[in-house]
Structure formats: C-alpha cells, structure tokens
Amino acid sequence: MKQARQIFWNALLLTGASLLMRTVGVAFQVAVSNRAGAEAMGLFSLMSGVYGFALTLATSGIHLGVTRVVTETVSQGQPGRVRAVVRKAVAYALTCGVLASVLLASGAHFIGVHWLKDARTVSSLRLFALTLPLISLSSVFSGYFVAMRRSYKNAAVQVLEQGAKIFFTMYLLALLSSGGVEQILAALVMGGAASELLSFLVEWLLLELDKRRHLPKPADQTAGNEGRKLIQITLPMALTAYIRSGLVTLQHILIPEGLRNSGSSHAASLAAYGSIHSMAMPIILYPAALISSFSGLLIPTMADCQVQNSKRRIRYMISRVWSLSMFFSIGVAGILICFSGEFGDLLYPGTEAGHYIRVLAPLIPIMYIDTATDAILKGIGEQVYSMNVNIADALISVVMVWLLIPRFGITGYLITIYFSECFNTVLSITRLLCVTETPTKLLKWVYKPLLCIVGATCAARVILNFVDLQASGVAALVLHCAGTLLLYLLFLILTGCVDREDLQWFGTLFHREKEEEPEAEYPERAAGPSVLRRGRKSPD
C-alpha cells in the first residue's frame, strides 16, 4: 500500500500543479486568442505542428528511456549506477537536440514558404529552433525525477515555467502586437523560449542537488551496459516517433489546404482550424491533467512490477486505472456536452468554439482512457507496439484528411478526428487485454456511469432552473457544473459503480496501516488495496 499511497500523493501534487497551470494557460490562451484573432492562432497551430516534429527529433524517446532504465537500475539494487545512466542520457539528448535545432533553423525558410505557404512563419520557426536542445535535456531531468518518485520537483518547475511564459509573452505582446500577425507569432515563440531557458536552469540545479543527496557513488567504476539499455528503449521509440510525428505534421499542413480546396478562403480556413485547435481543444483537454499525472507515474510503477514479474499486481492496477479513468472522463464529457454553449459564450464570445466543444466532447472518454492505456503499455515494455499503432493511426488520418476535407470541409476533419481516436484506443486496449488478461466490467465502468451522468445533467438543469441563484457568468457556470458533479457522484454510489470496497481503498490512501498482502491470484475483492505494494520490503 505504500507504493499506492506514494503514487496517489505524487499524482495529486502533479494534478494540482497541472490544473493550476492549465487554468492559467487556458485564461492566457483565451486572452491571446481574443487579441490575436482566429487567423493568427490558426497560423500558430500550423507552426506548432512543424515544431512538434522537430521536438520529436530532439527528444527521440529519451524521457521514457531514462524513466525505464533508472527504475530498473534502482529495482535491481544498483542506485550507484544511476549517475552513469543520467550521464549517457545527457550525451544522447544533447546530440539529438542540437541536430534537430540545426535542421529546423536551416530549413525554416523552405518550410514556411513552401509547406505552410506563409512567409510570416519563417522568423518564428527559427526562434523555435533555439529551444530544442534545452527541452531535450529537460526531458532527461524530468524522466529521472519520475523514476526516482520525486515528481514534485517536476511540478514545481512546471509551475515556474508556466508563470514565466505568461509574464514574458504578455510583456512581448505589449511591445510587438502592433506589428501584425508576424510580430504576434514572434512574441508567442520568444515568450516560450525564455521560459524554457529558465526552467532548464532550475531543473538542472535540482538534478545536481538531488544526485549529491540521494545517489551514492558506485564502488565499481567499470563500464556498465546503461548506454545499451537506453538505446534498446529509445531507438525503436525514436524511429517510430519520427514516422508518426512526420505524418501528423503532414496532416496539419494538409488541413488548411483541404479547407481552401473545399471553397474557403485562406483566412477563413485558418480561422476554422484555429477555432478547433486553439479554442475548443484546450477546453476538451483541460481536465485531462488528472489522467496525465497518474499516467506519467504509472510508467515506473508498471516497470517495477514487470521486473518483479508480478502479473497479479499489474492486472489489479489496470483494473483500478481503467475504472477511475472511465468514471472521471464520462463525467467530464457529460458536463461539457451539457454546458458547451455556456463555455463557448463565456470564454470565446462571437466564435464557433462552443459548437466545436459540444461536437468533440463525446470523444473525451476515448481520449482519456487511451492516455492511461498507452502509459501502461509503455510501463510493461509494449512501447514499440504502441508506437506502431500511432503510426498506423497517423497514416490513416493523413489519407482521410486528403480525401474528406476537400469534399466535406471542416466536417471531414471532425470525422477524421473521431475515427483516429477510436482506432487508436481500440487497438491499444485490445493489446493490453491480450498481454495481461485483465477482466473487464463494461456494465460497471461504462453503461452505469453513462446513465448516471445523463441523470445528473438533467437533474441539475431542472433543479437549478427553479432556484434563483442571483449569479451570472462565471459564478453561474461554476454552480451548475459543481451541482452536476455532486449529483453524478451520488448516482455512482447509488448504482454501485463506487462501492464500499472502493471507498475503503480510497480511504487507505490517507492513513498508514499495517497490511498483509493476500495470496489470492485475482479477484479485486480478494486482492484488496494492498496489492499495489512492492513484492519485497523497501529499505525504509
């Protein structure tokens, strides 16, 4: 139970930090979008697609590699070898980061003029290149802290980075926004670059202090196989990530071109694209902070169970993660569908954002469960399969974008998003079920929560419409969402989705108690909450 409690509190801390950053980030995105307009945000989204590919080249799977290798090294009782892992990972990351930076800077003019078909992006793409080595090295530091179960340091750095980004960006926007779209893009990129530099320096300092305090120097100074282990994990991930990221970049480049071919003007195409990616999607993905935090911490935990060959723990943890992810994501989807108009009018008045929020919200359970499933697959060594699925997904998406958008316009793009997410999730879940043989409970995890959220949203609408709340705007929306959430939780308990055993398990996360691990192979009831413990006693 100690490990489960550690995961819970680390995830809670990361979630709090992530929600804080996303809240501020969404507010910042709203302010920038309303000031810059949908066309500028659509152009920035296009640039971000190219930057995403360059970032994939720069990181080349190093975060997962460091997390897996450090976790395995510590689990095998060799903490002194962690220094060698980090040293070799830094060399790998620096090489990839510098190479990616040179390629993006040298190719910025060709990419901006011939691929994005807008010369206003050239200078911003070159500015983007400056951040790549910093982010690559930061991925090493972040992977180390996740593996060592000190994710609170990552959370602190992320909060600092977000605050710095907002400060620098708003300051630069005030100076440069009068110059038009190109100056706005430059302000956005330079603000992000300055914050990346600051966060890199702070995270590097934290890493050095952590190594001095927690890592012993190895008695055996002979060369180990840390570099080979890193390459075995990162190289397959990197190669598949290059292909997938390249396909995703191509997809994002084809979207505005397809919209223009469907009859829209260049400005209208960028506006529609910006409404989805820069306005609706941040709202859709905002609650995913909780799933993302738990998913990131699952990788070292699942890797630890894999090293110990504890299949029962793996199945139990998958069951827990899937049930919690479905309860949460179905609730979020119901609230956003019910109140999409209010969210759109409040955050992006006069735009189509509310419509796109309603259209995309049903995908939330699929997207969130896919995030958790991918993390589990990576933790148990199935990262190559996961990336192969992502490649197939990206390839199919490119074909669908090329065929559907010129004929159906933005509707064709929405069809592509739905098919892509469903395709990826179904294959990932199928693989995990085959590898781990985890039993599923569709009635408890899917059907009952769907009925609960439908009942909660309807009841909340009826009850609150008869109550004079004397509130408007943000206050009214918060009250409606909070009332819906409370009713949803009540219905989950009444329908047995959340039962006594679940509540007891959750309660054990808040206090220490001595437990003996049960011997039953797996049902949940027999295993109980203590199956999340390590197989061996920890030194402390």
Image (cartoon, grey):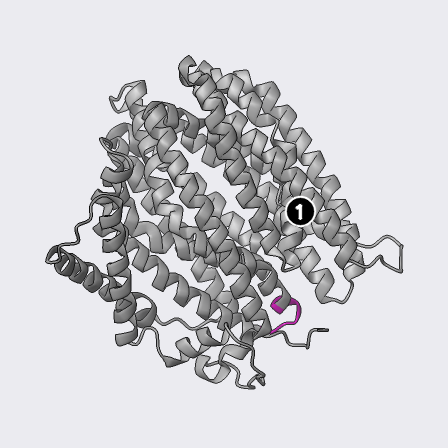
- Is 5 situated left or right of 38 in this image? right
Q: Residue at x 66, y 71 (%)?
A: 308
Quadrant of the rendered image containing residue 321: bottom left
Q: What is the x, y in percent for residue 381?
A: 60, 59
Determine whether 323 is above or below 111 in the image: below
Picture coordinates of residue 415, whole percent (x, y): 29, 41
Position of residue 56 in the picture relative to residue 148 (left or right):
left
Check the picture and name the quadrant holding the N terminus: bottom right
- Which residue: 59% across, 64% down? 301
Can residue 540 be seen?
yes
Magenta-span inclusion, residue 302: no
Which three-letter amino acid code belongs to the residue tagged 1?
Answer: Phe
Q: Is residue 422 left or right of residue 185?
A: left
Q: Which residue is mark 1?
A: 141
Q: Residue furthest left?
A: 466
Q: Position of residue 151 (x, y in %)?
A: 59, 55
Q: Residue at x 62, y 27 (%)?
A: 130
x 39%, y 47%: residue: 286
Residue 243 vs 296, above or below: the answer is above
- Region rendered in magenta: 305-310
